[in-house]
Image (cartoon, grey):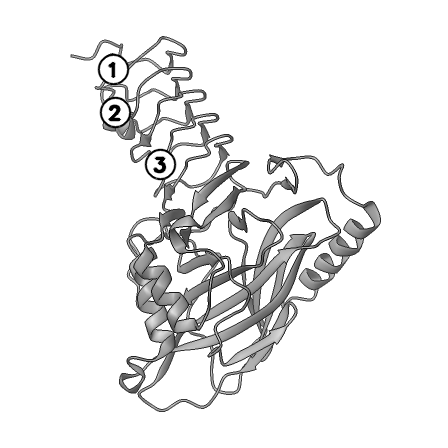
Amino acid sequence: MNIFPASLQELDLRHCNLSDSMIPHDFRGLFLLQTLKLCGNNFTSLPASIGNLPKLTELWLNNCKRLEHIPELQSSLETFHANDCPRLEFINMKFWRGGELNLHGCRNLKCLQGFFNLEPLGVDVVEKILGTCGLVMEKPFPAVEVHIINNLTRTAIISPLQALCEKSIYSIFLPVKDIPTWFSHQNEGDTISLQVPALDRDCKVTGFLISVVYAWEDSIESCYLSPNITVVNRTRNFDWMYDPRVTFFPCEVEQDMMWLSCWLFENERNEKGVVDMSWRFQDEMEEGDRLDVLIDMGFGIVVKRCGIHLLYHHNDLQGSQSNDILAAISHACFSRHHGRFMMSSRLWLTFNRNCHVVTLTRRWYDAQSFKRWSDKREQRVNELPGFYQ
């Protein structure tokens, strides 16, 4: 029996000391409920029946210090606040259609289902990647920790190595000084180009690997984190742009970091639910196409080296180094697939070299140096195919 009247449109249960045993579990009869406020309570998860509220547009969960899990929410939701929930790890937002989203201070968030997730890297995966790529870490794997800086939650934590999955892009970050030696195209600096080669009839491109080695500039006290990879098809006049929500740094900030990302075409994937059609990553490349890769990790972060390597589907290529890497990344990342990218605006996050905290201030910046970086990035964007058209 529902304890609330069916005509209820707003329910405010903030700071009621509600635990898992005390929170109402049957919200299904509240067909007119639009606003639900549960801030400052002590439950660890929300009742699944909250996902059955057809008119719910606002959900407030700020300062729920024990909250760990949020079930699937209705697509009617337009405002979702869960700030300062330090134990929150999982939110099912597969049918989120956009709106006001605030998750500031949720430093342990591992998965926003429908958009991204972080997964621990096992020893076997790291050893496989290092062995296949001919790379070496300075410390043994169990001792390696990294800074994980999250733009969505405005947090920086120290954590063991993680893999990042967003849409059909899967990334691994390792504290090593070079990219895989077998990458077909590599270059010093932040740009690399290739021409799509001729392919046999039974061979097709399924995606590509991109590798980036980056580090903190020695003279910069604080950096602005804004990683971006843009792949431009100059021949066909279109581009793919990726700016991950999460950035990784070694705990010893003077060290280099290698970002290895796997981009897989989505031609044959049968999506369910909401699909992001604003970022279509399909096989639209043909023999002779010129691809330019442009990389910018942010102000105060130097890109030392980068590379791109095409991935193929062909029986004769089984057992190749790129397929071995793909298998290792698959093992680490492919437990989930996300249909969309998080389209909320990016923040001007600053990471300080000395105190290792994230802030929204830019007071540490050298104004002239920052302007030169900002102007260069803006010029790059303006030169992309079809920009502002």
Kindly indicate whether the residue at mark 2 contacts the one at mark 1 (C-beta within 8 angstroms). Answer: yes
Between 82 and 154, which is closer to the camera in this rendering?
Answer: 154
As measured in the structure, the alpha-carbon distance from the residue carrying label 1 to the one carrying label 2 is: 8 Å
Q: Earlier in the sequence, mark 1 or mark 2?
A: 1
Q: 101 above or below 269?
A: above
Q: Secondary structure at mark 2?
A: loop
Label 1–label 3 contact, CB within 8 A: no
Residue wearing tag 1: 24
- Residue under the image location 65 percent in, 42 percent down: 353
Left or right? Give the position of 261 relative to 273. Answer: right
Q: Position of residue 259 (x, y in %)?
A: 50, 60
Q: Earlier in the sequence, mark 1 or mark 3?
A: 1
Quadrant holding the C terminus: bottom right
Percent of width and height locating residue 159:
44, 43
Q: Amino acid at mark 1?
A: Pro
Dot 2, crowdedness within 10 Å: few (<14), some or many (≥20)?
some
